[in-house]
Image: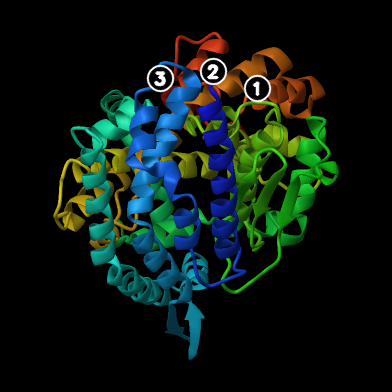
């Protein structure tokens, strides 16, 4: 490693630490603003055209490729930081009237997914959408700037930028996911019809807010109590030989705050010495799923080798960490895990519900990938693709999708592809764990050691390369499809 790159990596890590701290404080509800400008201005030189072009020309090594993507993507982010800050701060501060009170926008999204009265749910959904749509012009401007910046770096567009630098073969992945959509269509629509019929919701009138409520699994709430959430995670990790309470580099933030993000998240302030697992406990199966998912991220990062280069500890293919996250949250649909866990009373019917839930997410993200391919093919000005968004996701999911979220439901850099690749990696990793340590691998310290050996690599390797290290040819959608279509274990 050159001295120049060494200095660059040290400063880049300091930048990410300050940036992650700011995102943490906003997401954890500790401050209602998101102040990025001072951080980006302090480290502006890291993303100068000179530095970015130098790193783009130094992609012959693995660290070089990671650093090039970091520098170029942060140059794009830097160009839109004011808009990012404006959108996020506005949504953190936004409120709406509900039941005679002003309710924070983030908290109202929690209320939406737990509202059993359909008429009230539809009305609350309408009010939330009105707030979301207020920022669509800013989102369109932000996206157009990202596209323009990618072109200014010499790429033929935003899609080639993501494919070349992030090493994601988007067209291949889209073909694989279209095969998944086709293969799982009959199973999905059969299950969807049964769930809607049971809830008394006409199929032709079903709205995404109806489905999101049903996916919360309110019928299972008593089996997943709020006060058992952390003890259940603690016991699960203990089976792998991991003592949650002795991990000094992992902070659990479980305090309830009005402005706190309703979704759990893992904040990697400094890998591996300062990792934070943030959740606003509510109880219910969805809360357990999100906590276990983020705990998978957290365990990956706290076990990452401290001596590894910055490029391997903090950068790389996020499909890898998503795979580890899915490995943990998908434990919840496993009867063997349920019998091992003495903290909660797991109902047998939950396996069928979990299969339905998993199908939903895979089909939704496969459709998102198709939509984002169309969205990112446009240069400025970004057209209103609300109807196309509603059409593509509606066809995949089978319920009414609001067009107004056509930009709010998009993450930078085709992150939906990371999730899809992560799901493929998870199935392959889980199969190897079962082969080597048995169906109750989660109760094996040897399995824990096996995972720690993988985790300590950070993200040095891509998910495809790790699949090969597990003796697969590469990421395989057929394994994922077979897993989705197999009868839920009783």
SS class, disc 1: helix
Q: Quadrant of residue 337?
A: top right
The tag earlier along the polypeptide, 1 or 2, is 1
Q: Which mark is residue 454?
A: 1
Q: Nearer the viewer, mark 2 or mark 3?
A: 2
Asked which secondary structure carries label 3, the reply is helix
Work out whether mark 3 precedes mark 1 in sequence or the reverse, and give the earlier one: 1
Q: Which residue is mark 2?
A: 466
In this orientation, does residue 341 appear? no
In the rendered image, which quarter is residue 372 located in? top left
Q: Nearer the viewer, residue 158 or 364?
A: 158
From the viewer's perspective, tell me whether residue 486 is left or right of residue 370: right
Q: Is residue 359 positioned above or below 455 on the image?
A: below
Q: Quick one: label 1, few (<14), some, or many (20+) residues within 10 Å?
A: some
Query: Does residue 444 appear left or right of residue 63 in this picture?
Result: right
N-term-proximal mark, 2 vs 3: 2
In the displayed structure, would residue 488 be above or below residue 405? above
State the SS at label 2. helix
| Tag 2 near tag 3, CB within 8 Å | no
The residue at 36%/63% (across/down) is: 82
The Cα atoms of the two marked residues, 2 and 3, are separated by 17 Å
- Residue wearing tag 3: 478
Quadrant location of residue 409? bottom left
Identify the residue at the far front of this view.
3
Label 2 crowd (10 A; few <14 / some 14-19 / many >=20):
many
With 445 as the anchor, is 287 left or right in this view? left
* Label 1–label 2 contact, CB within 8 A: yes
Left or right, residue 223 beside residue 485: right
Residue found at x 64% / y 63%: 282
Q: In the picture, which quadrant includes the N terminus?
A: top right
């Amino acid at each position: 490693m050159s001295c120049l790159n060494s200095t660059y990596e040290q400063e880049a890590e300091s930048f990410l630490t300050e940036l992650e701290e700011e995102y943490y404080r906003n997401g954890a509800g500790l401050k209602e603003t998101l102040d990025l400008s001072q951080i980006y201005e302090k480290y502006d030189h890291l993303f100068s055209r000179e530095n970015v072009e130098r790193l783009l020309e130094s992609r012959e090594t693995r660290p070089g490729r990671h650093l090039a993507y970091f520098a170029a993507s942060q140059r794009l982010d830097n160009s839109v930081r004011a808009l990012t800050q404006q959108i996020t701060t506005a949504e953190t501060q936004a409120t709406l009237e509900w039941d005679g009170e002003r309710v924070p926008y983030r908290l109202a999204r929690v209320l939406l997914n737990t509202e059993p009265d359909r008429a009230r749910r539809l009305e609350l959904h309408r009010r939330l959408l009105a707030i979301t749509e207020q920022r669509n012009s800013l989102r369109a401007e932000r996206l157009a700037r990202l596209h323009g910046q990618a072109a200014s770096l010499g790429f033929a567009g935003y899609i080639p930028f993501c494919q070349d630098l992030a090493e994601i073969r988007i067209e291949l992945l889209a073909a694989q996911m279209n095969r998944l959509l086709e293969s799982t269509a009959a199973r999905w629509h059969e299950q969807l019809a049964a769930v809607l019929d049971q809830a008394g919701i006409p199929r032709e009138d079903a709205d995404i807010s109806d489905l999101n409520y049903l996916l919360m699994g309110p019928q299972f709430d008593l089996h997943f109590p709020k006060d058992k959430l952390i003890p259940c995670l603690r016991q699960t990790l203990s089976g792998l030989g991991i003592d949650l309470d002795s991990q000094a580099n992992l902070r659990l933030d479980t305090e309830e705050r009005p402005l706190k993000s309703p979704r759990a998240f893992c904040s990697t302030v400094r890998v591996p010495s300062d990792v934070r697992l943030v959740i606003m406990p509510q109880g219910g199966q969805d809360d357990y799923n999100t906590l276990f998912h983020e705990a998978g991220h957290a365990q990956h990062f706290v076990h990452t080798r401290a001596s590894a280069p910055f490029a391997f500890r903090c950068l790389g293919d996020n499909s890898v960490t998503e795979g580890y996250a899915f490995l943990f949250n998908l434990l919840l649909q496993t009867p063997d895990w349920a019998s091992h866990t003495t903290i909660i009373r797991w109902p047998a019917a939950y396996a069928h519900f979990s299969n339905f839930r998993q199908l939903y997410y895979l089909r939704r993200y496969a459709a998102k990938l198709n939509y984002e391919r169309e969205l990112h093919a446009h240069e400025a000005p970004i057209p209103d693709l609300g109807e196309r968004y509603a059409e593509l996701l509606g066809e995949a999911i089978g319920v009414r999708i609001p067009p107004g979220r056509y930009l709010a439901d998009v993450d930078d850099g085709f992150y939906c592809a990371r999730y899809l690749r992560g799901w493929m990696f998870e199935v392959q990793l889980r199969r190897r764990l079962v082969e080597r340590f048995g169906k109750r691998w989660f109760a094996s310290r040897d399995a824990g050691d096996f995972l720690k050996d993988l985790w300590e690599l950070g993200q040095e390797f891509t998910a495809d390369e790790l699949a090969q290290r597990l003796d697969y040819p590469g990421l395989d959608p057929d394994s994922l499809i077979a897993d989705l279509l197999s009868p839920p274990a009783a």
